[in-house]
Image (cartoon, rainbow, N blue to C red):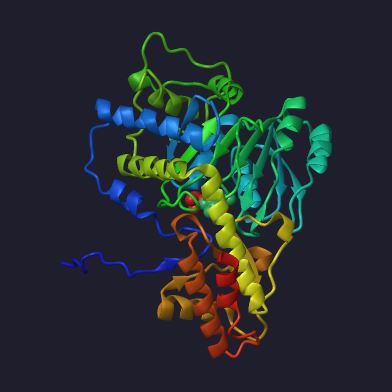
Amino acid sequence: MELFEVLNPPQRLLMGPGPINAYPRVLQAISNQLIGQYDPVMTGYMKQTQRLYQQVFETNNEATLLIDGTARAGIEAVLVSIIKPGDKVLVPVMGRFGHLLCEIAHRTGAEIYTIDVEWGEVCDPALIEQEIKRIQPKLLATVQGDTSTTMNQPLAEIGEICKRHGVLFYCDATASVAGNELKIDEWQLDAVSVGLQKCLGGPSGSAPISLSDEFVKQINKRKHVEKGIRADHHEDGVEPMIQSNYFDLPMILDYWGEERLNHHTEATSMLYAARECARLYLEEGAVNVIARHKQAGDALATGLKAMGLQLFGNQAYKMNNVVGVYIPDNVDGEEIRRELLLRFGIEIGTSFGPLQGKIWRIGTMGYNARQEAVLHTLAALEAVLLRHKAAIQPGQAVIAAMEYYS
Ligand SMILES: *Cc1c(COP(=O)(O)O)cnc(C)c1O
């Protein structure tokens, strides 16, 4: 028999680009006992969670709900439900997650068109309009905060452009939601998906999404109710069936809607978590939470610069909640990360693709968008860098961040 030890993970301070340490109240929420799927208390919690996320997303969209799975499940549900083979999809690619949208859309049989933006920059809305006119896509799929580059794509103007040209507008806002502004209705987004493990301060495993009435109308053309639960009044949509059962949004909407048609079993513990993440965000107030992320992010950046390190990317478009910083010459970035983790219990992020081995990414998100988390991280990073004989300015970083906060 192999039992291993009782679960007892080490205390870590998670200062990477996600996941992060969860808010204590979210951990408490998860530890509550399970209830049945159709218990009126459970369906009540589902309705409350919908209402909470309408407020988080600043939308009246009735189709605001959770997809069970990590953020990628939300992305996949949106894309597989809307894209039919041969549909044209336009994707501005400014980092790893733009490539992910292309990859998922490609699997659905989409004809993909990209606007390739240099990593560390964002995409000009005028260029998006030019490409929309030329390509006439069905869908524009974007990423708001691409954590791979730490850039935040401005979205406010793009919705109006899409509306004018009859294009549906989807955004993956996983990394940016709750740390940067996101206004679904005002910005005329048709579909948004997120996750909990960034600024919302929860564990990964639930993907809140919101869909406009127009988006719902489009996907309902592909509606198809499973045989085993079908009743006489159910009619199939006129367009081809959605290629995934688990991510079939029309069926998931029937499960979350009045009919409560059985689909999957809602992930109860994750719903408890998602519900508490939203309550925490709304209770503190959107403006205050976003300001706290900006303050923590700016304090961290100030400290890194005081140490003599160079920040990555166009700082005018930096996300509030994560900073990219060049690994100084003559040190091994992975060795520094390992030492921070094993000696200080602090995790910072590595990088992908063209930035691998060139920058670290340090996040200040959710529960960790706090002064002491920023100061501990700067103090530890400075000590480890000095021990590795990096050419940095000693004794400045923590004080600069403290001054920033005072
Ligand atoms: C972190 C992140 C995700 C995470 O996806 P998971 O499936 O939850 O791992 C998705 N999109 C973006 C833009 C992210 O930054």
Q: Is residue 143 left or right of residue 287?
A: right
Q: Position of residue 16 (x, y in %)?
A: 51, 64
Query: Which residue appears farthest toward the left when viewing the image?
Result: 1
Query: Which residue appears farthest toward the top when viewing the image?
Result: 232
**Residue 278 seen:** yes
Indicate whether 333 appears above or below 115: below
**Residue 165 seen:** no
Q: Position of residue 254 (x, y in %)?
A: 42, 22
Q: Residue 189's image quarter?
A: top right
Q: Position of residue 159 (x, y in %)?
A: 70, 33
Indicate whether 214 appears above or below 341: above
Q: In terms of depth relative to the viewer, which is nearer, 51 or 217?
A: 51
Q: State the count of labels.
A: 0
At 72% from the left edge and 60% from the top edge, which residue is drawn? 315
At 35% from the left edge and 33% from the top edge, which residue is drawn? 264
At 38% from the left edge and 18% from the top edge, which residue is drawn? 258
Screen quadrant of the C terminus: bottom right
Indicate whether 327 appears above or below 160: below
